[in-house]
Image: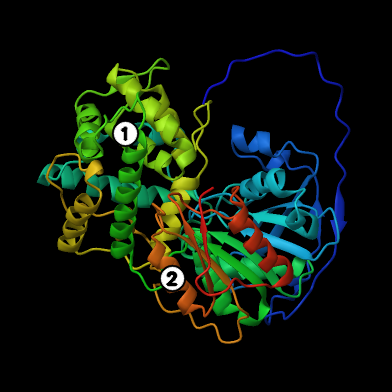
Amino acid sequence: MPVAACTSPEPAPTPAPTVTTESAGPAGPVPAGLDKFYAQPLTWGDCAPYATSDDIRSAFGRKDLQCARLTVPLDYAKPQGDTITIGVLRHKATGNRIGSLVINPGGPGASGMYAAAGLASQVGNTELGKRFDLVGFDPRGIGASQPEVTCLTDAERDHERTEDLEADGSPAGVARQDADSKEFAAKCAERTKFGTEMLENLGTRDVVKDMDVLRSALGEEKLTYLGYSYGTRLGSTYAEAFPRNVRAMVLDGALDPNQDEVESLVEQGQGFGVAFNEFAKWCAARRDCALGPNPAAATQVFQSLVRPLIDKPVRLGDGRELSYGDATIGAIQALYSQQLWTTLNSGLNELKTGQGATLMALADQYNERDRSGHYTNTQDAFTAVRCVDDPPVTDRAEVLAASNRYDQVAPFLDDGRPNGAALDPCAFWPVPNTSQPHEPHVDGLPPVLVISTTNDPATPYQAGVNLAKAMKGALLTFEGTQHTVFLQGNSCVDDIGSAYLIKGDLPAEGTRCTAQ
């Protein structure tokens, strides 16, 4: 959200940050041919040069954070060939140190460095922060890692968000969307350094190998890991590739390792449908509820507010226009966390009066667009990783059926127009997928902790149940409506998760925590 500008006296000159080089590796087993990567020193210094947006720049300003670059092969099959770098951020343990806790917040495409910086401010003084270095990394191609996946310019991303009229199910609309998807795939290959070679080595298969190099360079014999959302896929894939290199692993907001892209999308839609209904119940108890006092009518009221934007977007004070797509993305962003429900209600009330700034701010938050109009590459990377992590869906009948099912389970997102069978960019991707859904084989893996939320809008509860079973781990159930929960203020979940990471204590079977 925009804030008022203020002035202050000219600050005193900041002393030059301390730069230190540490040689902690190699630690643990080293795959053949990768000795120089596993043994590499890390040079830690100021994090400011690693920032890729205004918000990240602000988060990286803390003096107790250090950043470094990890060098890894572009293609692990060619370790003597081209190399790329991974951005790494660290907040050092302040007490009796156990080791490093490596963090990934999900996406795919989200910045682990930014996530670790945020966690450092929240838990740096807790027992967890005292016992562990909090370490976040930007996966290859993402954020501060170099080179980054580049598909669309900022202007192109802005324009893409206004194209509601093209997204209809008519033959002409489908043809336009197919052309856009094909063009997007081509731009990713053209604009990303190393082109198709980078794209084909971008997926989870390769990121977990980077994680093992990072483990060694940090001097850790075994990995202690915290993964949220897509980060649970990184966790389960790492566990399959390096089961004996794991010390402990918390996986929160799980992806079902066996689920294909279509089923995952429909189940996610169902999760958002449930979360919207919970929002409607919460809202109905308020005098200012934008959806009215009857939760059963909330979907119809929401549709009456946002569908007119398809033909007549709301012009904002900065010259941009709130489209139907932005309004619904803004709502989705707010449904990730109950902390944003008040903001969503305000945005919907604004829309009734022809205003759209709050919903646009929520959509910008989802798309990671800062106040200067710059986007991080999260959305580009999300598509690029997804396209190599899963087989492409090219059956138009399957696409159409999935769209129709999505409208049934998340009716508030039904735009009222017939669905089409347009293909997404993965159908035109220039390289083949390198992974696919499957049951992970994790013989030799120590017990892991999976946390799953009953009304998680993005990763359904059952996915966590399935992942815990597949990995022979413990399941902690959180009864609530939000996406992920560990280290977000629920003392029951935080205490159980921290005790596991610090001491290896697992909760008893059937343990449940509730919202406070």
* Crowd around label 2: few <14 · some 14–19 · many ≥20 (10 Å): many
Horizontal relation, residue 20 to residue 346: left or right: right
Can residue 434 be spotted in the picture? no
* Crowd around label 1: few <14 · some 14–19 · many ≥20 (10 Å): some
Q: Position of residue 187 (x, y in %)?
A: 40, 47
Residue drawn at point x = 36 percent, y = 52 percent: 185
Residue drawn at point x = 30 percent, y = 53 percent: 269
The residue sitting at the bottom extreme is 443
Q: Nearer the viewer, mark 2 or mark 1?
A: 1
Q: Is residue 243 above or below residue 516?
A: below
Can residue 45 be spotted in the picture? yes
The label number, if any, that marks residue 284 in the structure image: 1
The label number, if any, that marks residue 31 in the structure image: none
Q: Is residue 80 above or below residue 445?
A: above
- Which of the two discs, 2 and 1, labels the residue nearer the N terminus? 1
Q: Mark 2 is on which residue type?
A: Val
Q: Position of residue 261 (x, y in %)?
A: 33, 63
Of 277 and 314, nearer the camera is: 277
**Residue 196 picture quarter:** bottom left
Horizontal relation, residue 44 to residue 414: left or right: right
Query: Tag 1, which secondary structure?
Result: helix
Residue drawn at point x = 28 percent, y = 31 percent: 291
Contact (CB < 8 A) between labels 2 and 1? no
Q: Mark 1 is on which residue type?
A: Ala
Give the residue number, with chain letter if any, for mark 2. Answer: 465
**Residue 499 picture quarter:** bottom right
Q: Position of residue 105 (x, y in %)?
A: 56, 54
Horizontal relation, residue 215 to residue 235: left or right: right
